[in-house]
Amino acid sequence: MPEIQSPTPAEAFELLLAGNGRFVAGTPEHPNQDAARRAEIAPGQRPFAVLFGCSDSRLAAEIIFDRGLGDLFVVRTAGHVIGSEVLGSVEYGAEVLGAPLVVVLGHDSCGAVAAASAVVDGGTAPSGFIRDVVERVTPSVLAARAAGRVEADEVVAEHVRHTVDLLLDRSRVLAERVDGGRTAVVGLSYRLADGRADVVAARGLDVTATTAS
């Protein structure tokens, strides 16, 4: 049986955008969600994208991008904060599973970003390990403020960009794949009200050319 050709980073991004477009329009196709697909991928997985997103319950990746079983390798943490386990998971999806696309997915009304902004403004830091999440988001808030970006959506976009940069700064594996043209990293900001995911950062991919219609 011939080996299935993996999509290019641009083709993978187009697949993701097309699915989000169907979700926004209310015309989902629910691909790869039947028993045949379940049987097909039981021997192994070959996702076309790694999706690293916020854990918010309103960001169910396969739903908002209208995909199915075996399509997305999903990693999620509150505020899409990065630790060694996240880096290892993303590297596994890209290097071992061969995904040509890594997506960082943030969203408006993010509780972690709001909490970090409140602390920067003099509020009380939360207790327990929630404090650790807030502390990891705080540099993004400070960077946004320093650049004159004070609106909530602007801070969210800055946090997505910061996360993209952090992934590539900390993961040599991912940086080498992007430099070699094998993987692209794209940052998206999701709008809860209308379901649209907008590009806010891209490494290894010309998104203006990719999204042109």
Image: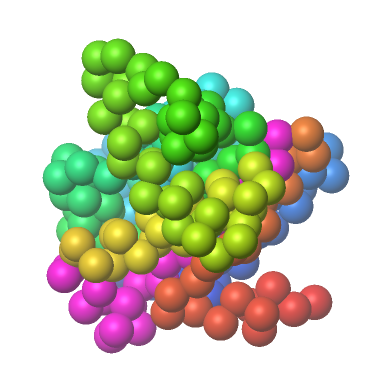
| Residue at x 47% of width, y 48% of height | 141
The percent position of residue 37, horizontal first and vertical second, equals 46, 39
| Residue at x 36% of width, y 65% of height | 165
| Residue at x 21% of width, y 50% of height | 87
Question: Is 140 in front, or is 81?
Answer: 140
- Looking at the image, how many numbered discs can be counted on the residues? 0
The percent position of residue 48, horizontal first and vertical second, equals 42, 58
In this rendering, is residue 143 above or below 63? below
Extreme-front residue of the structure: 122
| Residue at x 66% of width, y 83% of height | 209
The percent position of residue 94, horizontal first and vertical second, equals 27, 61
Residue 123 makes an appearance in the image: yes
Extreme-top residue of the structure: 127
In this rendering, is residue 93 above or below 135? below
Question: Is 167 in front, or is 74?
Answer: 167
In this rendering, is residue 26 above or below 48? above
In this rendering, is residue 183 above or below 39? below
Q: Is residue 190 magenta?
A: yes
Q: Is residue 20 magenta?
A: no
Q: In the rendered view of the protein, which quadrant contains the C terminus?
A: bottom right
- Tell me the magenta residue range: 172-192
Q: In the rendered view of the protein, which quadrant contains the N terminus?
A: bottom left
Relative horizontal placement of residue 184, taking residue 18 as reference (left or right): left
